[in-house]
Image (cartoon, helix red, strand yellow):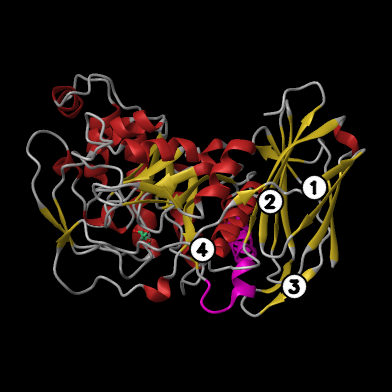
Amino acid sequence: MEDAHLSLDPAFEIAPVNRRLFGSFVEHMGRCVYTGIFEPGHPSATPEGFRGDVLDLTREMGVSVVRYPGGNFVSGYRWEDGVGPDRPTRLDLAWRQIETNRFGLHEFMSWTDRAGVEPMMAVNLGTRGIQEACDLLEYANLPGGTHLSDLRIKHGAAEPYGIRLWCLGNEMDGPWQIGHKTATEYGRLANETAKAMRLVDPGVELVLCGSSNSQMPTFGAWESTVLEHAYDAVDYISLHAYYEEDGDLGSFLAAAVDMDRFISSVVATADHVRARLRRTKKMMLSFDEWNVWNQARYEGREQGDFEEAPVLIEDTFTAADAVVVGDFLITLLRHSDRVSVACQAQLANIIAPIRTTPGGPAWRQTIFHPFALTARHARGTVLRVEPRSPLLDTARYGEAAQLSAVATLDDEGVTVIAVNRSAHEALDLTADLRTLGRLRLAHTHLLEAGADPHATEAAVVPLANAQLDGAQLRALLPAASWSLIRLTFTGADPA
Ligand code: AHR
C-alpha cells in the first residue's frame, strides 16, 4: 500500500469558503422544471405548485445559488412569455419541447425564496440582444415608476427581486447554440449588453460566456478574444465541463485533474489578457455547469416530435460517479481564490442529484451525498494542504496524483476531504495538524466505490479506521473512495 501526506497550517490560506461554490442549475429542459421542481397537484405540492419533497432535498443538499432558465433553452427564450396572466405555448427549438410557460420568472423567484437559494439569471443573447436583456433587468430589479417595473408590481411582486448574478447568454461558442456567434461577434455584443445592463442597475455581477468545454477547437482563443472585448464590463468568465466513464474507470476516477487543468488554463488566459490590457482587476471564474454526464448514451434532439416535458438525460448515477463528483468539489474549493461561482448541472431529473416520479416520490442519487456533506462541513477558510502523493498513470489524462484533498478551517474546527483515485489500491493517509491547536475527531464519512463502482446505490458510512494520535491524523482510504473527516477544537461542541 502507498502512503500520502498532508500538512495543514492556518497560515496556508487559499480563500474564504465561498458559499456560491455550492450552486446548482434549473433549466427548462426535460423534466427539470415540470414534474421536477414544479408539479401542481403533487401530494407534496406547496400552494404555488412546487414539489415540497424536492424543496426539502434541495435544502438538505445545501444548494446556495441556482442558475436559470438555461442552458441552451435560454438562447431562444422570450422572458415576457413567462410573466403575467397570458402565457403563450411555444416551441422550444433547443430541446424540441413544447413550452407552456406555466413556470416563469415569478414562479422561479418564489421557488428560490422557499428553497433559500440565490437566483442566477441568464439573458438570451442568441435570438435577442441588449434591449431585451435591459428590459428583463428593469422588470426584475427596479423598484417601480417605469413601465416594466410597474408591470412586475401589477403581476403581484411589489418588491424588486434584486437579482445580482446574470449570465450574458449561454455557450455562445457552440455551433449547436441558437444564435451561435464568433468570438468577435459575441465579445462585442456581451460588452455592449453588460454596459447597458450596468446603466439599468449598477449592482449587477455579470458572467461572460467562456468556451462550452475545453475540447472546443476554439478553446483558449475564444476566452482571449471575448475578454479583450468585455474585460472591463464583466466580473466573471464561465466554464462548463461534463465527464463520463466511457469504459476506462482508471481515467474516470482521475477526471478532476482535467477540471483542475481547465481552471488553470482559463486563469492563465484571463491573466494574459489582463497583462495585455494593463488592467489591475482580476477576472474571476464562474464554473456554472459541471457534472458527470454519460454523453455517449445521449442521442441528441435534432429530430423527432416536439413534446411537453420529455424524459431527457435522466442518468442514473453510480458509486464511482459520486467519488468523482466529490473530487470535483475538492477541486473547486482548491481553486476558490479564482472560482467564485459553481453550479452543478442540473438539480432535478436532468443529470441530477435529485430524481422524481410524476405524482410519486423524489429520491437522492449517489452524487447527492458528497455534495450535501461538502456543502455542510466545508466552511470558514480553504487551506492549502501541501499534499505528497503517489502518482497514477492514466490513459486519458496522463499523470495524476492518487490523492486529491482539501481542508477548511473555521472557528469550531477543521474539515479534511480526500479522494483516493486509485481503482484498486488503498492509500495510507497521514496529516500533520501540529499548528492548529488541540483537536479531537468529531465525525467521519466514507463513500466507497472500489468493490462495486457501478452500483447505483452508495451508502455513506463512518471512516472507522480514522484516528488522531496527538497532532497526527491517520486514515486508510479505501480504493476509489471519497472521505470527509471533521475535527473540532477541544472545548468546542462537535458540529
Ligand atoms: O445541462 C445540459 C446542457 O448542457 C445545457 O443546456 C447546455 O448549456 C450544456 O451544453
State the residue position of label 2. 483
Amino acid of disc 2:
Ser
Q: Categorize mark 2 by other alpha carbons within 10 Å: few (<14), some (14-19), many (20+).
A: many
Callout 1 secondary element: loop
Q: Does residue 28 appear to the left or right of 22 in the view shown? A: left
In magenta stretch: residue 176: no
- Please give the name of the residue rendered at 59% of the width and 42% of the height, measured from the top-left corner: 373
Query: Which residue is more in the foreground, 397 or 356?
Result: 356
State the residue position of label 3. 392
Which label's residue is closer to the chain start, 2 or 4?
4
Q: CA distance from mark 2 to mark 4?
A: 16 Å
Amino acid of disc 1:
Ala
Which label's residue is closer to the chain start, 3 or 4?
4
Callout 3 secondary element: strand
In magenta stretch: residue 246: yes
Which label's residue is closer to the chain start, 1 or 4?
4
Query: Residue 57, percent across and down?
Result: 42, 40
Q: CA distance from mark 1 to mark 4?
A: 25 Å
Q: Categorize mark 3 by other alpha carbons within 10 Å: few (<14), some (14-19), many (20+).
A: some
Q: Does residue 421 appear to the left or right of 314 in the view shown? A: right
Any part of residue 35 in sight: yes
Query: Residue 302, percent across and down?
Result: 23, 73
What mark, if any, has residue 466 been given in the picture?
Answer: 1
Q: Which residues are magenta?
A: 245-269
* CB-based contact (under 8 Å), mark 2 and mark 1: yes
Determine the image quadrant of residue 211: bottom left
